[in-house]
Amino acid sequence: MSALQTLAQQAIGMTGDRIPPTVLNQARLCILDTLGCILAGTKTEECRLILECEPEQPSEAIKVFGTHHRRGLREAIRINAYLGDVLELNDLIGGHASIGSVTAAMGLAEAVNASGLELLEAVVRGIEVTSRVYEAIYPSMRRYTEMGLVPVGIPSTIGAAAAAAHLLKLDAQQTLNALAIAGSLAGWCPAEVIFGQGGTVKPMLFGAQPADTGVTAAYYARAGMTGPIDLLDSKIGYFTTTSTNGYFDEESWKDRWALEQPRRKLHACCGYLHSPVDALGRLRQKIPMDALQKSQISVRVSPYVADVVSKKRMPNSPNDARFHLQYCLALVACGSDVILPEHSIKLDQQMLRPDIREAMQRITVIQDTSLSHYHHCGVQVAESNGNTFEQNLSAPRGSPNEPMTDDQVIDKFRMLAEPVIGTDHTERAIDDVTAIEKMTDVSALVKSLTTPEIKETS
């Protein structure tokens, strides 16, 4: 069988009675974490822009979370996923699986009056399929300078289709075709848009476009359309395009779930920056601040990481700041423990700080071919008196080896949600997601994600 045939079969078998409790728990946390990111995204200028681009719809349309707005199904899915990605706080499971799968599943569950259990099963299917496609290419992924695209876009689209197929109750053949159609319609996710000067369109690529396309593909498959089932492992398919030795190892997934090794974000920036940020943060605890302000800082990262996030120029936009290694390291060198949304939203103010601008000039990025994963890095601080301090790191906070606890994920949701929907609605949403299997439909959860007091979106 082709990889897509195997993945479709695996997805269909992911029912509530077969999914381990630990996996279901992580899926609930993915829903909560993603919703928090969406709510926080409503506070950005990009929220106003995306709402203006999508026309208002009648009251029976789908909710844009954290606002008084409603839109058609596809429009609402695009907007919610866009807002959930704009601050770079959404999780890194399977690349960026949740932002596409959760938003597709939430929108479609509201549209078809799905139960909470059906929503949860759909999210598990989406995240697992996304992760399994992405892992097939990641160990031998080509450098961005070779392929010019970011490989997470196509897996996320296929995963969103798997989630949508469940909620639309597609049979096995329709589900397979939904995955195949989704992959064939997926955007190529150009690396320049994400890591270069892509402007405000970037958040469309990791979640919004995949979620929208995945749902569309599921509807096409339900109507009888078919797709290329060899899309992944053909000699001219996705694996060949994005990697030197990509293949789907069915055997490795028999007793393993991607959701049991979650990668979640503590920092509001690209995941490629998290290890260097945490490594420098550890060194800062050992070095007096006045000495650190005069020290030279060098960071070793994988060449494919340096290709896209090492930038000698100053950040030119909030989005660029979230993908700017020297800028984020300068924030840490000047006292920040966590990269916060305000560090990019208020970039103009940060760029007025002489200490930030000066620190950026003292940071050198080194391409280290011995490092193969973006979680691996080494940071050295050389003081003016000749003393040096080094910190190697392979597990930043939030990664599988240093995971966020359930309480930390819930607290993150509170931090992101309360400024938008208030304390009562925030706690209600936490309770709803925690007991989501008991919900006959998701309307109560959707209702908790806004308040009557919200009149307009800033």
Image (cartoon, helix red, strand yellow):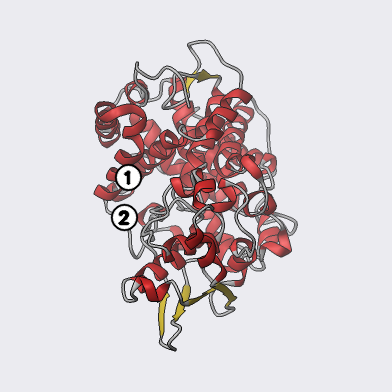
Question: Horizontal and vertical percent for residue 277?
Answer: 44, 64
- Asked whether 76 or 11 is in front, the reply is 76
Q: Please, is residue 364 above or below residue 13 in the view?
A: below
| Tag 1 and tag 2, C-beta contact below 8 Å | yes
Residue 129 left/right relative to 303: left
Which residue occupies the extreme right position in the image?
A: 236
Residue nearer the viewer, 190 or 423:
423
Which residue is labeled 2 in the image? 404
- Circle 1 Cα neighbour tier, 10 Å, few/some/many (<14 / 14–19 / ≥20): some
- Three-letter amino acid code at disc 1? Lys
* Count of picture labels: 2
Residue 344 seen in the current view: yes
Q: Position of residue 415 (x, y in %)?
A: 32, 41
Q: Residue at x 61, y 58 (%)?
A: 314
Mark 1 and mark 2 lie on one chain; the one further toward the N terminus is 2
Q: Is residue 388 above or below residue 87?
A: below
- Estimate the spatial distance between the alpha carbons at disc 1 and disc 2, rounded to whole Å: 10 Å
Where's residue 27, x and y in %? 36, 44
Which residue extends farthest bottom?
386
Residue labelled with disc 1? 412
**Dot 1: what SS?**
helix
